[in-house]
Amino acid sequence: MNPNPMALQTWHKEMIKCLFPYSGQQRKIETGFSAKNPHIPNKLYKYRDFSNSHHITGLEQGKLWFSSPNNFNDPLDTTAKFNHNHLPVQRQSAEECLADIAHIRQIEQSGGTWHPPEITNPINLSEWESNVYAPLIAQLPCDMREAAQNFISLLKQEMNTDAVQQMSDLLQNGFSVLSLSADPTSQLMWAHYAASHTGFCIEYNFEKIAYNNLRRRLCFPVFYRKRLRDISRYLSKLRPNFNNYFGIYVCLMKKIEWEYEQEWRIVHPSGPSNANRNHDMPPPSTIIVGQRVSNENLEYAQLFCTRLNIPIKKIQFEIGSEKPTIHFL
């Protein structure tokens, strides 16, 4: 385990620089994938529960369930924060701004709710305030300044609320994610995801998966952080240079409390309608059963491994021993 999970290695930095720059025009896709490829662990693992019929069906069919982040057990998984000063607003003249102010006043007086229109010519909010709002306020009659100030306050609030909601919905619903672990010996993982050590762990040999196979190509390390990532600058590039890979980057962010999982993720930008579904996986290279596996489930696992002609192993946690052992059965 990395003693400092927040310290990025050189290849991490290269991958991020090439795949997840703020502007899509600066993206170097193949360079980024090439930087990551040699560092994908040779073996990755999925912890499973014998009592979960979906886990057994998936094992038999060679499939695993990819889920949208809104179904994850951590509500802060794949979330980000925004600085409204970097959020995009519509570029407009002082005259257009005045027309908007009058329109908003009419809506407020009628009891309605104003929502910002679609942004077709973006400018970030701080630039808009400097170039349009401040000069406009200075030249307005005193009786109009309060309305203008109310407008900018409402604009900030609405833009921030709308952007956060839209981006959160996109990130939480629009991506299809499979979580894997680089560690088959985590006591906490066996307890949390393998039914208190009674389940099993599927080993996949990623060393044998070709570079262009999507299972390898879209496999990324998770970055563990103390604070949520501010993605406002990605939004400031909405058009024409928006980097649509940034959603993958956000899917790789988790709070540092989860660092023990040593997680890697396969992330598909599938869209909400296809995010939650089974996907084919390569054949397992090994099945590892838990220390408390029942005789019945052990027999099933042995028969399964015999059919696939792969080894079966068992993990053992010994009292007083710092590291568990995994041995062939």
Image: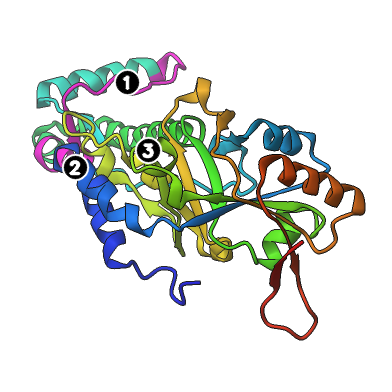
Relative vertical location of residue 41 with respect to residue 144 in this rendering, above or below: below
3 or 2: tag closer to the N-terminus: 2
Relative vertical location of residue 312 with respect to residue 247 in this rendering, above or below: below
Q: Magenta segment: does it hold 112?
A: yes
Q: Are marks 1 and 2 in contact (CB under 8 Å)?
A: no
Rendered image: mark on residue 104 = 1
What type is the residue that disc 3 sits on? Asn
Nearer the observer, disc 1 or disc 2? 2
Residue 171: percent from left, percent from top: 45, 36
Residue 18: percent from left, percent from top: 21, 49
Relative vertical location of residue 328 with respect to residue 112 in this rendering, above or below: below
Is 287 on the left-hand or right-hand side of 122?
Answer: right
First to last magenta residue range: 108-132
Q: Residues within 10 Å of mark 1 (few under 14, many from 20)?
A: many
Q: Quadrant of residue 234?
A: top left
Rendered image: mark on residue 27 = 2
Say if residue 85 shows up in the picture: no
Is 99 on the left-hand or right-hand side of 45?
Answer: left
Q: Which residue is mark 3?
A: 160
1 or 3: tag closer to the N-terminus: 1
User: Which residue extends farthest right?
Assistant: 295
Residue 45: percent from left, percent from top: 59, 53
Q: Quadrant of residue 184?
A: bottom right
